[in-house]
Image: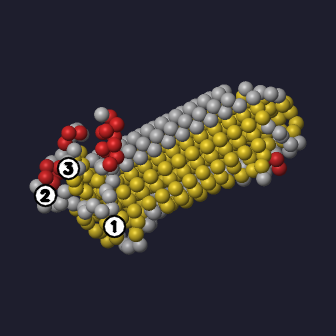
Amino acid sequence: MAAMLVAMLSFYGCAQDSEVPTIYKIFELNQPGTLNSKSSGGGIKVKTHDKNEVEVQAFIRKNGKVLSLTDPAVDDVLDDFELKIEKNGSVITANAERKTNFKFWKNMGIYFTITVPREMSCNVSSSGGGLKISGVSGKHNFRSSGGPVYLENTAGTTNAKSSGGRVKATNHNGDIYLSSSGGGVALDEVHGRVHAFSSGGGVKLNNIHGDVDAGSSGGGVSVSGKCGYVKAKSSGGSVHVNISNLSKELYLYSSGGGVDAIIRNGDELGLDLDLSSGRVKIDPRNFSGRSEKDRVKGTMNGGGIPVYMRASGGSINVQFED
């Protein structure tokens, strides 16, 4: 029953492109603005266009069908919701909040598709579905307790959190803070600082151009890219790192598996090594210090960049590659 309910909510989370909205409003906006949108009855989709206007489509649903505005059932749904779609200066508001406690057997909800100019800061949250955001540039806060959060081609300082599913971002420019307690976290092609944490799955960060702070208590952690600083911790799996441009610090810790690290051109760097596990495999160059089967502590090439690794659930394997 629980799986069926989750599937139902996910299905109605966001509008399909072929659906006709119940309510459609357009607001002119001749300067970078802010979108405030929240829904407790469905998901929210935000996309962009090259017009100086915001288009808000509200889909009112009952019994699996999107209603037309003239359908008498619209009033039944709105009896349970507070619907607000308005403009105040450069701020656009699109909210659909339940007045009463959620009841599955009513099978009704309201979800949005909102099209905005590319320069648009967004504060978007949903407790009834997921979020899908693409193309926006500004300062953003995204939150879902009813489904996943997906971001693509976004820019600006961004916070995204889900307690109902995974969080995934693709092609982001700017600092980004992601967390999930309902699934994993994944990023691909990010230019900026990354903070990524999950208690519901693993964390996978690919093609990162910036400093990284990542952790998971629900799975492993993997990081690849050009990173001057990496801190990666896992209590639910292994830690894997493949980086170049190391210049500040490398801190890797796993209590649920091993640690594997590839440091590009690392044999040319001055490193302060502190590695400990049941077995440590490394071939340090110009090394001075203590090197044993389960512990390596000392300097390489005269020292400089701190490299700290611990693995209580597996071995440590460090490789230096071009």
Identify which residue is drawn at 78% across, 35% down.
281
The residue singled out by tag 3 in the image is 62
Residue 81 seen from this side: no
Task: Name the N-terminal-most of marks 1 and 3.
Answer: 1
Q: CA distance from mark 1 to mark 3?
A: 26 Å
- Between residues 283 and 123, which one lies in front from this camera angle? 283
Direction from residue 7 to residue 177 in the image, left or right: right
**How many C-alpha atoms fall within 10 Å of the one at disc 2: few (<14), some, or many (≥20)?**
few
Q: Disc 3 marks which amino acid? A: Lys
Front tag of 1 and 3: 3
SS for callout 1 = strand
SS for callout 2 = loop
Front tag of 1 and 2: 2
Quadrant of residue 54 in the image? bottom left
The residue singled out by tag 2 in the image is 71
Q: Disc 2 marks which amino acid? A: Asp
Where 236 falls versus 119 (above or below)? above
Quadrant of residue 53 in the image? bottom left
Estimate the x, y position of residue 116 in percent, counting from the top left: 38, 65
**How many C-alpha atoms fall within 10 Å of the one at disc 1: few (<14), some, or many (≥20)?**
many
Estimate the x, y position of residue 213 in percent, counting from the top left: 60, 44
The residue singled out by tag 1 in the image is 54
Identify which residue is drawn at 25% across, 63% down.
20
